Image: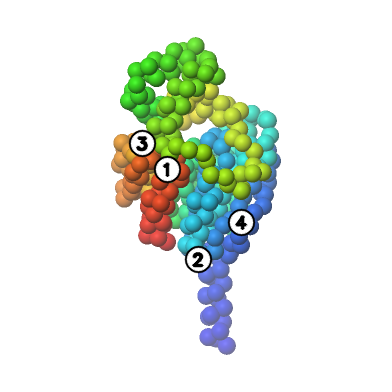
Amino acid sequence: MKFFSVLLMAALMLTGSSSRRLIPGEGFVQVKGGRIWYKIVGSGKGVPLLLIHGGPGSRSCDGIPTYSTLGNDRPIIFYDQLGSGHSDRPTDTTLWQLPRFVDEITALRKELDLKDINVLGSSWGGSVAVEYMLSQKPEGVKSVIFAGPLISTSRWMRDAKVLLSQLSQPVQDTIEKYESLKLYDHKSYIAATDSFNIQYLSRKPGERVRVADCDKSAKSNKEVYRYMWGPTEFNATGTLKSFERAERLHEIKEPVLFIAGRFDEGRPETMYEFQKEIPGSKVVIIENSGHNKVRDNPEAYLKAIRQFLNQVK
């Protein structure tokens, strides 16, 4: 009897120290302002990976086919931030504040009983991830992946100016002209910014592959993007205007990977600067890729993520 009691106590300790088994499926979690949608893919036994999509105001569905291939290793958790994708779409602008987006992570972990977790924040999702780590000091986070992250608004804008300087002079002049006039919908401005996007956002031409999860998903929420960032990629005027967390990166003690495309808006040089702030952190640069690594070079991108996660378990 004593032997079986010891076994029972050990089993209870193990159960209490890890997340419950995640079952593939989807659902909603109530947060301040409405409900956020989530989807769980994969049945691998590794620690789950929570994906925080970019934006602000974007959605998760475009990355589901690619990231789902990691599901053989571990459960992959997608979710749409409030105001985007399958989630509710309130119009109350007081909701578009970084701390409230951080609270979504806490709500998801509580609802899904995610005691142990890996976190991947892409682009603006990197802002949510870094703020979550710094403001909440959460337990159970096994690693953090920052993919082309927005961690410093001033650095992001400086990088954008560097990238603009590498385009043709007519493109630079056109963007400067219509930026000064604030005519962001002018066809000449749109054409010029398309030149920027082809170089640094996604370098893979052609039509997007249809994604079933996107069929019933709302498009990107431009109102949220403009309120939090601004009307143009090159100059922040919204609530993220003064967002600066680079100098606090050293507070993160968990294993960290910075990953960016060779031609990413989050420039490789910036990733190496961020790396200096976190001893032991790693940097991987994905060749032949812009900011949208999932689209440009998914094989190399996923390989780097898988290798990193398998090292931290």
Disc 4 element: helix
Q: CA distance from mark 2 to mark 1?
A: 29 Å
Q: Earlier in the sequence, mark 3 or mark 4?
A: 4
* Closer-to-camera residue (13/64): 64
Q: Please, what is the three-letter code of the amino acid marked with disc 2?
A: Lys
Q: CA distance from mark 2 to mark 4?
A: 16 Å
Residue at 57% in and 72% down: 12
Q: CA distance from mark 3 to mark 1?
A: 11 Å
Across and down, in percent, residue 199 comes to 39, 32
Q: Earlier in the sequence, mark 2 or mark 3?
A: 2
Q: Is residue 22 left or right of residue 234?
A: right
Few, some or many C-alpha atoms within 10 Å of disc 3 (few <14, some 14-19, many ≥20)?
many
* Closer-to-camera residue (90/140): 90
| Residue 263 image label | 3
Q: Please, what is the three-letter code of the amino acid marked with disc 3?
A: Phe
Q: Earlier in the sequence, mark 2 or mark 4?
A: 2
Question: Does the residue at mark 3 contact the one at mark 4 (Cβ under 8 Å)?
Answer: no
Q: Can you say whether 45 is above or below 127 in the image?
A: below
Q: Earlier in the sequence, mark 2 or mark 1?
A: 2
Question: Does the residue at mark 2 contact the one at mark 1 (Cβ under 8 Å)?
Answer: no
User: Which residue position is annotated with label 1?
Assistant: 296
Tell me if residue 312 can be seen: no
Q: CA distance from mark 4 to mark 1?
A: 32 Å
Q: CA distance from mark 3 to mark 4?
A: 36 Å
